[in-house]
Amino acid sequence: MTIALQDNVIRLIGSCPAEDGETLLQHLLTNPAAQIDWQGCESAHTTVIQVLLVSGRTVRGPAGGPFLERFIGPALARFNRQV
Amino acid sequence: MNEFMEQFLLESRELIVQAIDDLMALEAKPGDKESLDGAFRAFHTLKGAAGIVEFAAMARTLHAAEDILALLRSSTGAVSPNVLNECLACLDLTSRWLDAMQANGGTPPTAEADADEMIARLAGSMDIDESEKAVAAIPPGGDWLNRLQNAAGDQFFGTLTAVRLVPDPEAFFHGKDPISAIASLPKLLIVDLAPTDPAISLEAMNTFSCNLEILALTRAPIGEIREALHGFGDRAEICQLIPSQMPALDADHLARATAILEAQIGLLREEELGGLLGRLASAGRASANTLRYIGKSALAAEIEAASAVALAQGKAGPLITAIETALQREATSTQSTNTPTAQIAASRALRVDMDRIDALVRLTGELLVVKNTIGHLARKLQNHEGPEAVSSALHDQHARFDRLTAELQRAVLRIRVLPLRTVFRRFPRLVREIAGDVGKTVRLIIEGEGTEADATIVDALFEPLLHVLRNAVDHGIETSAGRELAAKPAMGTVIVRGRQDAENILIEIEDDGAGIDVDRIRTVAAARGIASEEALSAMPDAEAVDLIFSAGFSTAATVTGLSGRGVGMDSVRAAVGRLGGTAGVRSRRGIGTTVSLVLPFSLMMTRVMTVEAAGQAFGLPLDSVLETTIVSRSAIAPIGSGRAFVLRERTIPLINLAEALGLTCDEADRQSAKIVVVSTSGQIGGLEVDRLGERLDVMLKPMEGLLGGMRSVSGTTLLGDGRVLVVLDLQELFA
Amino acid sequence: MNGSSKKRILIIDDAALIRTYYRSALEVRGFIVEEALNGLEGLEKVLLQSFDLAIVDVNMPQMDGITFLLELRSKQLPVSGVPVLVISTEAGIQDLAAARRAGANYYLVKPIKQEVLAEYAAVFCGAPQ
C-alpha cells in the first residue's frame, strides 16, 4: 500500500505507481480537509504529481526522495503562489 | 509615437507587401525557389523588426511562419495552397496588429491570444500536408523561456539547456512517466510545472490523461538532453541558451569582458585554418581593447605584443597563452575596477554632399596660398626690404584672408545643412493613411522642399510637423458632406510649404478646412481655466486663436484615435521652441487654417548632463563633467568651513548643489552621496546632487526676466516634458 | 575620446530598421557609423575604409554574414583583422559555433537593447575609461 489515509492525513509512502493518481484523487475528493504528507515518499509517478499540482494543497514535507524534495516541492509551491 | 515605432510601422508594411508578392508568385509558380527565398527573408526580417520594438506575440507568430517556410525550402515538393493560405493569413493578422498599433501606440491587447491561434493554424497547415498524421504539434508555449527564467532566478546564467515538455494526453497509456524522464536528466537546475488547462479542478480532472506542461533547465549539453527525451518526439521543445542571452552578464562588465576574452580563445582554438592571420589579428585587437576598456592597459599592451609574435610566427599559441594569462590575472586582481564607464563625446553622423567637401578643400588650398604669401612677406621684412611694399602686400593678403574666412564659415555651416525634402517626403504616404483612417479625401501639396536648414533642425521637425498635419486632416478639413454644404470641392487640400526668410526658415502648413471657431476657443479656454472670461472677451481674435498652443488645450468635439493622444499643439510649440523657433497660427472661419513655424537656419547645441537637487532639474555643461561617483557619507570630512572627500588619493572640495543655490535641501539621512566631479578653470570640485540624470543636447537661451539676475546660471532650455532646465555656470558656482 | 581618434563601426544588416536602431545607439556614444546592406556591400566597404569593428547579421540576401566572415578573414592584413561582432536572431549553440568557425569574435542574439549594444561596441573599440 503506497497511499494510506489515517487520522485525516493522506500519506504517500515508498514509490507511488501510476494508478496511485486516481487513488489520491478519490481520497482528496472524499476528504476535502485532509492533509497530504510525503515524508515517506521516495518517488511518485507523474499521475500522482499531477493530482498534487491540481489540488493546490500544501504538502507536508520534506519529501522522502531527493528529486521530489529539491525540484517538485518548489515547483508545486511556485504554482500554488501563482494561483 | 517614437521614431522607431514610426519606422517600424512603415517598414513592416513594406515587408508585408513584399511577402505577399512573393507568396502570390509562389502560388502562380509552385516550387519557385526565388519567390520562396524572398518570402522567407521578408518573414525573417519582419520577425527581427518585431523583436526590436519588443512585440513578442508578433515575433513568435512570424517565427512559426518562418519555420514552415524554412521547412519548405529544405523540401523538394511543391508548396501546398493550404500552407500559402495560412502564411497569407499570418501576414493579414500582422497587418491588423500594425493598424492597431498605429492607432493606439501600443501592442494590441488581443495579440497574445491571436498569436496562439495563428501559430496553431500554421502548425495545422503542415500536418494536413503529411501523408501520415504525425504526432500532434506541441501547443504554443508563449513566453515559456521567460517563465523559466523567472522561476530559475539567479541560477539563470552560463550555458544552459531549456526544455519544455508537453506530453501527449495519452502518454500514461503508452507507459510513459514524463516527470521521471525529467528527473533522470543530468545536471538539472530547476523544474517548473503547470497544468495545460489553468482552470482545471480536482472535480473535473481525469487522472488517466496527462495535461501537464513541464519546464526544466539543465547545465547538460543539448545533445544529451535530446537523447534523454527522444521518446517524446515533437512534444519536447529543447533549446540551448547561449551566454549572451543571460541578463546577469550585462549587469557586470567584468563578467562581460571575461566572456569576450574566453570567446577569443575559442575562436583561436578553432581548427579551421582559413584566414588564420585575420583571426589572429582580430582576436588580438578584440582582446587588447576589451582589457583597455576595463582599465587594464598594461595587460592590453602584453596582448598586443603577443599578437605581433603570433602573427609573425603564423601560430595562435602565443596569443592564446597571453589571453589566458590576462584572464588569470584579471580574476586574481584585487584592484577595484569600479571606475565610471567611458564617456564619449557625442556626435551625429551626417551625409554630406561631395560638392560641399570639395568647396572646403578648395578653400583650404586658397588659405594655404595666403599663409605662404604672408610667410614670404615676413621674410621680406626680416631682410629689411621697403616697408611700403610689404605693408601694401600685407593689406592685400589681409583682405583676401578676410574673404576666405567668411567663405570658410559659410562652407562649414553648409555642411551641416539638409534640404527639408528629407522630412517632407515622408508625409504624402502618412497623410493618405491618416485621411483614410478618418474617412476623408485629402491631397497634400508640398512646396519648397529644396529649402535647406541645419540637419539637427530638419531631423527634429518630423514629429511636430506630423502633429500639425494630423490636426489639419483630422480637425481642419471637413467631411466631404460638410465640404459640399460649404460649396467647396469634396477633396480637401493641405499645403506644406518651406522657404528661407532672411536668417530663418519658415514652414507653413495650410489647410482649406473649416478654420478655427474662435468663440469656441474662448469658451473652452474659460472652462479649462486658461484665462479669465474678462481677459478672454477683451482678447483680439488673433490672440485667442493662439490659445490652441496652450498646455492641455484640445477643442476637438470628439477625440479621435488619431489626434487624441493626449498631446496637443502645445507639444508642437514646445518642440519648435527647443530648436529656438516659434510657432503661430492664422485662421479664417470657413476658409482654412495656416500654422507657421519659424526656425533658425542653424543652431549651436550645448551638451549637458542633467542632475536633480531639491526636486529641480539642473543642467551641467558636459565638457566640464569629469565623472560621477557615489561616496559613503562617512568618507566626507569637514574641512575649514566646507567639506571634502577623497577620490583616488586626491582631496576634492565638495559642495551641495541645493545649498549652494540657496534652495532648501532636505538633509537626507542617506548613507551615501551622489557626486558629480567637475573641472572648472583648472580646479576640480565635487557637486553633491540628489539624482544623476541623462545627457542631452540642448539649445541654450540666455536668461530673461526674473531669472536674469540669478547667479551661477548660464542659460535655460525647455525639456521634452515642458519643464525648464536651468543650465549652471560652474565657474561662478565654485567661485 | 578626442575627435581625431573616433572609432569607426560598420553595420552590415539587410533590415533598415535594425541599422537605424544600431546607428542611433552608436552615434550618441560618439562612434562613426557606416552601413552596408549585405555581406557583399560590407566587403566592399572594409576593403576601401578602415574600421574598428564590424557588426554583422547572419541572414542576408546576396551574401550572408558567415560567407562575409570567411571572405573577410581570407583577405590581406590589416583588412582581415577587423574584429567582428555577429548579432543574429538565431539563438542556437550551433549558430554560434558556425559563426565562430567562420571567424567571428563574438556572438550576440537579437533583440539587443541599445545600451547593451553601445556597451559592447565600446568594449570592442577599447574606449578608454
Image (cartoon, coloured by chain):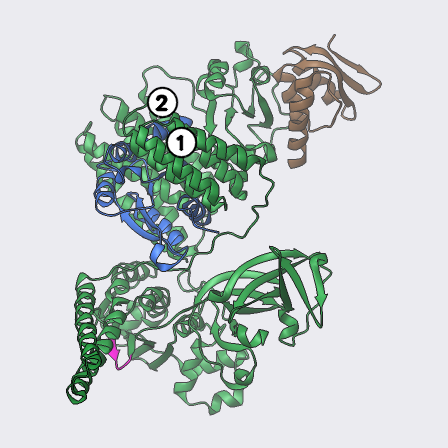
Chain colours: A brown, B green, C blue
Question: Are the residues under marks 1 and 2 on the same chain?
Answer: yes
Within 10 Å of the Cα at label 1, are there few (<14), some (14-19), or many (20+) other Cα atoms? many
Residue B502 lies in the magenta-colored region: yes
User: Furthest residue to the left?
Assistant: B389
**Residue drawn 39% across and 86% down?**
B542
- B271 with respect to A68 (left or right): left
Chain that bears disc 1: B
- Which secondary structure is most common in the magenta stretch? strand
Of B493 and B495, the residue lying toward us: B495
Q: How far apart are marks 1 and 2 (CA)?
A: 52 Å
Disc 2 marks a residue whose amino acid type is Asp
Disc 1 marks a residue whose amino acid type is Leu
A43 shown above or below A62: above
**Residue drawn 53% across and 32% down?**
B328
Chain that bears disc 2: B
Within 10 Å of the Cα at label 2, are there few (<14), some (14-19), or many (20+) other Cα atoms? some
Say which quarter of the image contains residue B320: top left
Secondary structure at numbered mark 1: helix
Of B612 and B37, the residue lying toward us: B612
Residue C23 x, y percent position in the rendering: 35, 52
**Numbered range of the magenta stretch:** B499-503
Residue B225 lies in the magenta-colored region: no
Q: Is residue B376 visible?
A: yes
Numbered tag placed on residue B127 in the rendering: 2
**Residue drawn 60% across and 61% down?**
B675
Residue B39 x, y percent position in the rendering: 26, 36
- Quarter of the image with the C terminus of chain B in it: bottom right
Secondary structure at numbered mark 2: helix
- Quarter of the image with the N terminus of chain B in it: bottom left
Counting labels gives 2
Q: Mark 1 points at which residue?
A: B319
